[in-house]
């Protein structure tokens, strides 16, 4: 360091004196705070204070004594500090102490004492001392930074993103102000309205933030480059580690219960699917039994039925194993997010995205019975849709950067495949077409070729279902689904359905009876004639429709749902200074079904929501700076999918699961940007190459590509899955009519005169009270639910499992059928297990 002038030395002495004086005053305030805590007479040791409190006071008095002594030796202290700041090691240590102290200070102030349980009193006594130590650490760090004059200017970091940042802020803040004032998109005022998405707790965000700081501070400051072999090895190890961690975390996290999954009970401990999940699983079972997809009946989710059928091939009828099998597939979601984040910004960003997804889905499992949503353990379409939407964003991001023909072909195929799981992704297709038009408008020949490839990829995968998925009259189930949505969602009516009333379909003879806990679906479900999915029937149970006529009313409802999906995604971000748990967050009124929340927020929470919007705006600005339209790929897909939900008049809860991660995407990117700015302000230099690991590639539209025919073949083979499952598999497996002949070969003399029905027992659920067993019975494409009184079991040791062949015997009394007995069948040998005693 250069020699300091006398004025500089005097100013440094003044700063040192201020540091000492402030520290002594804070110490006196800490002593006062400790003395103000009410004491417990039972633990009094001296002067009415406990031994632990006296020990804390002694430590504080000792520190005050040291500081007072040093205050009278300022010249010596100043000389010592002046010599120390010449050492880079000392400066690094002080920087580390300052950052750690600042983080611990925030934690100590905002961490509720209730988290310490029985040790709450000890923490309350220690809290003033801890805050004092942390304040000294932060103030000493600031004092050293002032002495070394090592603060940096931060405006240079915002200059490249300033324009995009301002536009993003205006749009986001303007939208939120409009929602907050008008309550449109915030407060329930229409049908099919659901609670916000699954939140992450403040302590989880804190953990991720600390990880970002640690990685930046200790890793990205290194000037040593990573060798090429090491990079290749990390490229394998990191995704594999993310995959294994995801499988372990999601699979081992216990799910108590959920409306779509019955709570496992003894003796078989199976998490049997229920409601929509059971319908999806029956669609898969019908494939394996040779009855086609959903018994050749109505469905708009044929590919998910095929997916579950494949999982059944590996897991059999063990639904605990089936959940693990699905998790193994869904564990690719954090892996894809890591790869996207790595290409988008850095390995750090990819790891942050993967961590946030793992934590959020873990929360969804834990809160399965508190917050209405879905999670990886449920047999529902939203989770596999989440995987597909992440893949769509990856492909769209890569195509905008490279404009590769193969990528646009695969992108069209993926959108087609996802549209066979839920209809919503069809809205992504025109959004992609618009992006293609904007990107290639100056090259018409290439534009036409790319659009043709996109549409070919989509139609190759999607069109086989239009041809093979038809009713006996030749009408496509897809178009019938569209008509159902129009009839159900676009017909103004007042719905007063409660949880105990029956949602009745209008175009079939199907009646659903919903009783939580797996009581019964008393009426038969004939899948060949079904024209309304259970998804819609169950959703309507909690719905309330605004009466009115005309286009304006429908437009208002659509906009309401569209904005609600934005607000419900935003509310999953941290908006509380206190370090609360997910259980604490789930108690908020707007996460309760059937709530009467008026849309108001406490001032602090509202301010933090605005802070979240600013971070998202920073992320959007940084994305636009780096990649232009490619950086907005997640936003484009979010808006397109959200638009589809608006048109379908759905919002919140399970419906936003496939897309609300995109809010976390830009939020995390903005958080990393701000942390980097703060570290640079503190003159903690980062190696630019390592923090921005992703290199921006030069675009060459006319670069020759590999032949497309292998990709066409792979897509065509994938597209063949639907017609094979629906038409070919039934030819390879005995038709249901042939299987039912087996009932005629079963001799049950004592049941002469009774009607015998052969089929399979599915989902035998042992009720908690021990009095009944509920099961579905599948026979000749018809499913009925029965409740057995366990006192009539002839063999108490028999444990019913799903997909057991059985014969049910019915007597006819006054034109009504009554179940008399049940026989399990193995090799055409009946075994009586239940018989009604009159």
Image (cartoon, helix red, strand yellow):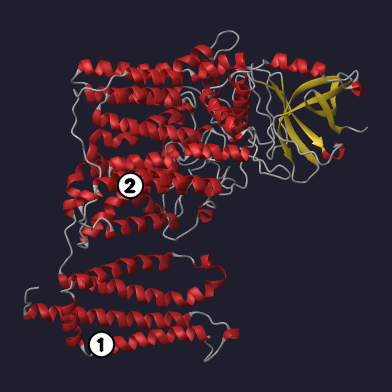
SS category of the residue bearing label 1: helix
* Number of residues whose C-alpha sits closer than 10 Å to that of mark 1, classed few (under 14), some (14–19) or many (20 or more): some
Q: Which residue is mark 2?
A: 234
In three-dimensional space, the C-alpha distance between marks 2 and 1, rounded to whole angstroms, equals: 51 Å
Q: In the drawing, what numbered circle is on residue 87?
A: none
Q: Residue at x 34, y 26 (%)?
A: 431
Q: Quadrant of residue 505 in the image? A: top right
Which residue is at 42% across, 17% downward? Answer: 716
Q: Is residue 701 above or below residue 574?
A: above
Res. 177 in view: no
Q: Secondary structure at mark 2?
A: helix
Report whether 149 appears left or right of 732: left
Question: Horizontally, is 330 left or right of 218 in the view?
Answer: right
Does residue 718 appear in this view? yes
Kindly identify the residue that appears in the image at 43 percent across and 27 percent down. Answer: 425
Against 48, is 452 above or below? above
40 w.r.t. 797: above or below: below
Of the numbered discs 2 and 1, the one sitting upstream in the chain is: 1
Q: Residue at x 49, y 74 (%)?
A: 124
Q: Residues within 10 Å of mark 2 (few under 14, many from 20)?
A: few
Q: Is residue 163 left or right of residue 753?
A: left
- Looking at the rendered image, the quarter that the C terminus falls into is top right
The residue to which callout 1 is attached is 70
Tag 2–tag 1 contact (CB < 8 Å) = no
Place of residue 339 in the rendered image (x, y in percent of width and height, measured from the top left) = 34, 40
Q: Quadrant of the N terminus?
A: bottom left
């Amino acid at each position: 360091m250069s020699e300091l002038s006398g004025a500089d030395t005097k100013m440094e002495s003044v700063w040192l004196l201020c540091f000492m004086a402030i520290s002594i005053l804070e110490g006196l305030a800490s002593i006062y705070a400790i003395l103000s805590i009410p004491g417990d007479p039972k633990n009094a040791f001296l002067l009415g204070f406990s031994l632990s409190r006296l020990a804390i006071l002694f430590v504080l008095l000792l520190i005050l004594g040291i500081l007072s002594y040093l205050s009278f030796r300022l010249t010596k202290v100043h000389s010592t500090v002046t010599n120390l700041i010449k050492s880079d090691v000392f400066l690094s240590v002080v920087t580390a102490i300052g950052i750690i102290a600042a983080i611990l200070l925030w934690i100590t102030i905002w961490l509720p004492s209730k988290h310490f349980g029985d040790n709450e009193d000890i923490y309350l006594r220690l809290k003033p001392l801890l805050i004092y130590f942390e304040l000294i650490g932060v103030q000493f760090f600031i004092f050293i930074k002032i002495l070394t004059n090592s603060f940096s200017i931060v405006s240079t970091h915002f200059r490249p993103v300033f324009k995009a940042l301002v536009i993003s802020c205006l749009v986001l803040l303007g939208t939120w102000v409009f929602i907050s004032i008008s309550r449109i998109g915030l407060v329930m005022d229409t049908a099919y309205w659901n609670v916000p998405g699954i939140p992450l707790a403040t302590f989880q965000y804190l953990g991720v933030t600390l990880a970002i700081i640690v990685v930046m501070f200790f890793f990205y400051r290194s000037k040593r480059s990573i060798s090429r072999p090491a990079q290749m090895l990390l490229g394998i190890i990191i995704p594999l580690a993310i995959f294994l961690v995801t499988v372990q975390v999601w699979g081992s996290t216990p799910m108590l219960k959920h409306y779509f999954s019955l709570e496992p009970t003894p003796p078989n401990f199976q998490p049997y699917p229920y409601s929509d999940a059971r319908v999806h699983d029956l669609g898969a079972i019908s494939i394996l039994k040779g009855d086609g997809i959903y018994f050749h009946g109505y469905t708009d989710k044929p590919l998910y039925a095929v997916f579950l059928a494949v999982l059944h091939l590996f897991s059999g009828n063990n639904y605990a194993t089936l959940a693990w099998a699905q998790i193994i597939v869904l564990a690719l979601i954090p892996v894809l997010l890591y790869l996207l984040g790595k290409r988008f910004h850095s390995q750090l960003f990819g790891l942050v995205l993967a961590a946030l997804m793992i934590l959020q889905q873990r929360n969804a499992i834990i809160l399965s019975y508190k917050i209405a949503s879905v999670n990886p353990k449920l047999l529902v379409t939203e989770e596999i849709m989440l995987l597909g939407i992440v893949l769509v964003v990856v492909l769209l991001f890569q195509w905008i950067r490279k404009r590769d023909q193969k990528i646009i072909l695969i992108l069209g195929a993926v959108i087609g495949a996802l549209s066979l799981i839920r209809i919503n992704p069809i809205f992504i297709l025109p959004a992609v077409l618009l992006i293609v038009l904007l990107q290639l408008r100056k090259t018409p020949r290439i534009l036409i070729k790319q659009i043709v490839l996109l549409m070919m990829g989509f139609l190759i995968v999607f069109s086989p279902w239009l041809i093979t998925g038809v009713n006996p009259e030749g009408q496509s189930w897809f178009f019938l689904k569209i008509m159902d949505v129009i009839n159900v969602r676009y017909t103004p009516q007042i719905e007063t359905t409660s949880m105990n009333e029956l949602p009745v379909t209008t175009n079939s003879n199907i009646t659903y009876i919903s009783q939580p806990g797996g009581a019964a679906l008393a009426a038969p479900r004939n899948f060949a004639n079904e024209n309304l999915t259970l998804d819609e029937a169950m959703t309507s149970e909690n719905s309330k429709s605004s009466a009115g006529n005309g286009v304006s009313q429908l437009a208002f409802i659509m906009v309401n749902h569209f904005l609600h999906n934005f607000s419900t995604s935003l509310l999953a971000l941290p908006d509380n200074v206190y370090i609360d748990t997910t259980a604490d967050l789930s108690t908020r009124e707007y996460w309760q079904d059937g709530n009467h929340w008026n849309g108001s927020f406490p001032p602090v929470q509202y301010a933090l929501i605005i802070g979240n919007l600013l971070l998202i705006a920073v992320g959007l600005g940084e994305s636009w700076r780096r990649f232009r339209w490619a950086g907005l790929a997640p936003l484009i897909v979010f808006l397109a999918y959200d638009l589809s939900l608006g048109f379908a008049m759905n919002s919140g809860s399970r419906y936003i699961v496939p897309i609300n991660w995109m809010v976390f995407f830009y939020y995390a990117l903005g958080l990393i940007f701000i942390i980097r700015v703060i570290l640079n302000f503190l003159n903690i230099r980062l190696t630019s190459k390592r923090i921005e690991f992703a290199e921006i590639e030069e675009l060459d539209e006319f670069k020759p590509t590999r032949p497309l025919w292998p990709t066409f073949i792979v897509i065509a083979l994938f597209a063949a899955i639907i017609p094979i499952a629906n038409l070919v598999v039934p030819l390879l497996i005995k038709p249901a009519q042939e299987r039912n002949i087996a009932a005629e070969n079963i001799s049950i003399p004592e049941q002469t005169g009774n009607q015998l029905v052969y089929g399979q027992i599915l989902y035998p659920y042992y009720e908690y009270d021990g009095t009944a067993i509920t099961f579905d019975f599948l026979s000749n494409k018809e499913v009925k639910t029965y409740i057995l009184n366990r006192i009539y079991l002839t063999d108490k040791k028999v444990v019913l499992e799903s997909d057991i062949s059985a014969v049910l015997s019915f007597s006819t009394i006054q034109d009504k059928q009554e179940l008399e007995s049940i026989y399990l069948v193995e090799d055409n040998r009946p075994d009586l297990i239940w018989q009604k005693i009159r």
